[in-house]
Image: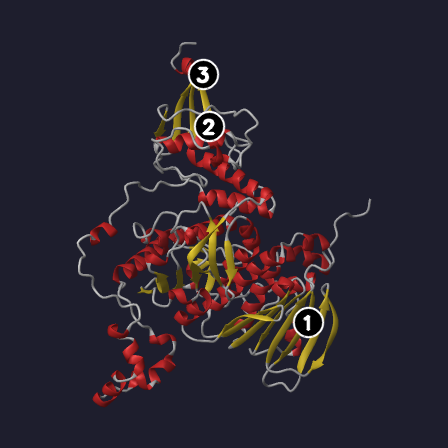
Amino acid sequence: MPDLIHLLPDNIANQIAAGEVIQRPASAVKELLENAVDAGATRIRMIVQDAGKSLIQVIDNGKGMSETDARMCFERHATSKISGIDDLFKIRTMGFRGEALASIAAVAQVELKTKRAEDTLGTYIEIENSVVKIQEPCSWSDGTSFSMKNLFFNIPARRNFLKTNAAEMRHIVDEFVRVALAFPDIFFSLTSNNEEIFHLEKGTLKQRIQQILGNNYISKLVSVTENTDYLNISGFVGKPDTAKKTRGDQFIFVNNRFIRSAYLNHAVMNAYQDMIATGSFPMFVLFIDLDPSQVDINVHPTKQEIKFEDEKIVYAFVHAAVKHALAQFSVAPSLDFDLDPAIQQLDAVSKPITEAKLNETSAGNLFRTFTQKYQAHKVEPASNMQDWKQFFSKPETSYQPSLGGVETNNYSARQQPDENESALFPKNRKPGLPVPDATQVMQVLNSYILFRVPSGLIIVDQQAAHERILFERFTGFSNSSAITTQKLLFPITIEFSPGDAAVFSEILPDLTNLGYHIEPFGKMVFIMHGTPSDLPSGEESGVIEHILEEYKNFNPDIRCGKREKLYRSMAYARSIKSGTILTSGEMVEMIRMLSECNFPNTSLNGQQIYVDYTQDFFDRIFGRR
C-alpha cells in the first residue's frame, strides 16, 4: 500500500497557521502597527477601507528593509529579533515570532514598498496566496508601506464569519488605541473610508490620554509612580468621580505591551474599594516595567495574555501603587497648562499686570458686563424672605423606583393598578400566576418576594421577574411603535472612548425606536435630547453607560439577533437589582405585570423566575411522607 502521510504545501500550511494569528482585520492591524514601532518609526499612518475587509495600509518612516530582508520577512518563522533560545527570556520588542507577515500573505493580497536611508531605490513586492507575483525596484521614501487587500479572499468561509463593519471597526480602533497609548512619543493617524478618525501628535502620556479618551479627564487624572527593585509602575488613574458603567477606559501595559489580566484589574478595583459605586469601573492607564525574564509573553498567539513568574508580588505592587496615588490626590480644581506649552508663552501668563493696565481693564465695557451690578439676571433682595425655607423643603411623598414605567407611589390609596398601566400586555387571557394583595406579600433578603396561595407558597426572584417584564415591554414597543419620549430641558453630553463610540453608533437607531433621542456630535461625543418617559430623572447617562456595557459583554452562549441582544441588554441594565427594598404595593404590581407576560416563569437566561412550593414539598421536608 502507498504511504499515507505527506507534507502539506506551504500555502495550505500558512493558511492553517494564519487561523491562529489573523482571526479578523484587527489582528492584522495589531501586527502591522507593532512592526512599524519595532522599525523605529516616529510617524505611523494607518488607512482602512470597509473596516479592513478591503484594505489595511500602514505607512511608517522607520528604517526600512533591504531587498533580501523584504523577501525574507514573508517566510514563516523569519525574524530579526531572536537568534537563540536565551533571547526568548529578554524580549523587549513587540513582534518576535516571525509568523505575522507570512500569515497575512496567506490569506490576503499584499503589497510591500520599503526603502532604507542608505539605498537609492526601494523594493516593491506583490504577494497573493503566499506566492510572490512581482518583485522589482521602486521609488519610495525612507520607511515601509504595507498594504493588505481583500482579507480572506481565498477562504470564503472565514470571510463570511466576519462581523458587521461597525463591529470590526470597533476592534480595529481598540487595537490602534492600545498601540498609540503605549507609545505617546510617536505620531499616529487613522483614516477610515477617507475620513480621518485620529490625528495624534506626539507628546506626553497625559496628552495622549486626552487625545484618545477625551477632554473629560483633563483635570481628573491622578499620577501613579512607584519605583522598586523588582518593578516600576507609572501611568494615570481617574479620580473616583470619573467612574463609569463601562470598562472601556482600562489599560494595563507590561513592558509597553498591552495585556489582558483579570487578576491585575482586580488589584486596581480593590484600590478603589468604598470610593466608587458598585457596578462602576474606574479609568486607568498603567505601565508595568520589569525584567523580561520575570514574565512569559509567549503563552498565547495574540501575546495579550502573559504569565508572571510571581503574580502575587505584582498584584501587591499594583494595588499599593494605585491606593497610594488615590490617597494623595487633591480634589481642588486646577488648571493644567502642561497640555499646551504654548499657553505659557502668552503675555497674559508670562507678564504681570500693572496698575495702569488694571485701571484700563476695569473701565472697559467687557469688565462692566461681568460685575454683579450690570448683570441682566441680577435680582434685588426682597423685603420679606421669611418663607424662603419652604422652597427647599422636601415634598410629602417620597420617590420610589419605577417598575417598568409604572408609577409606584401612594399604593396605600389603591391596591389594584389602573387599567391603563398595563396597556402593553394582553388582557384577553387568564394570567398564569395568581396576583396577591398587599397584605399577603413580603420580601426576603431584599431579593425575593414571597406570598401565600391556596396550594402553598410562591417565591419570586425580583430581578429576574423585572428583567422579563422589561424585555417584553421593549419587544412590545418595537412592534407597536407606541413609546413616548420625554424631552430634556437641558440636553446631556455623553462622551465615549473610540471603541465604545463605534458600538454605540451601531445600536443608536434601535435606541431611537425605544424612546431615546440621541444625536452624534463629533466622533466620540453624543447629545441626548430626550429619553423614554418612564426613565427616572438623573439616571440618563448612567443607564446609557450600563446598556452599552451589557451589550458589549453580552453572554456569547445566547444566540440572538442584534435587536434582541439590545433589548436583553436594556432589560439587564434597567431592571431592579437584588438587594433593592420594595414596598408591598411595588411587589404586588411587579407580580401582576409578570403574570401578564408571555413567559412569566422563564428568565432571559432560561432559569426559573418563580417557584411554587406545594404541601407535598413541605411534607417531604418534615418527613410526613
Tell me where residue 236 appears, x and y as whole percent. 36, 64
Residue assigned mark 2: 610
The image quarter in which residue 373 lies: bottom left
As measured in the structure, the alpha-carbon distance from the residue carrying label 3 to the one carrying label 1 is 75 Å
The disc, 2 or 1, on the residue closer to the chain's N-terminal end is 1
Q: What element carries label 1?
A: strand
Q: How crowded is mark 3: few (under 14 residues within 10 Å), some or many (20 or more)?
A: few
* Residue denoted by label 1: 111
The residue lying at 50 percent from left, 36 percent from top is: 468
Q: Can residue 415 be seen in this view?
A: yes
Query: Between 372 and 502, which is closer to the camera in this rendering?
Result: 372
Tell me which numbered mark, 2 or 3, is placed earlier along the sequence: 3
The residue wearing badge 3 is 455
**In the picture, residue 403 is in which quadrant?**
top left
Residue in the picture at 43% in, 75% down = 203
Screen quadrant of the N terminus: top right
Amino acid at the residue labelled 2: Tyr
Mark 3 / mark 1, whichever is N-terminal: 1
- Of residues 47 and 462, the one nearer the viewer is 462
Residue 353's place in the image compared with 420, above or below, is below
Q: Which residue lies furthest to the front in this view?
A: 383
Q: Residue 101 carries which label?
A: none
Name the mark nearer the viewer: 3 or 1. Answer: 3
In the image as oriented, which residue stretches furthest toward the top?
A: 625
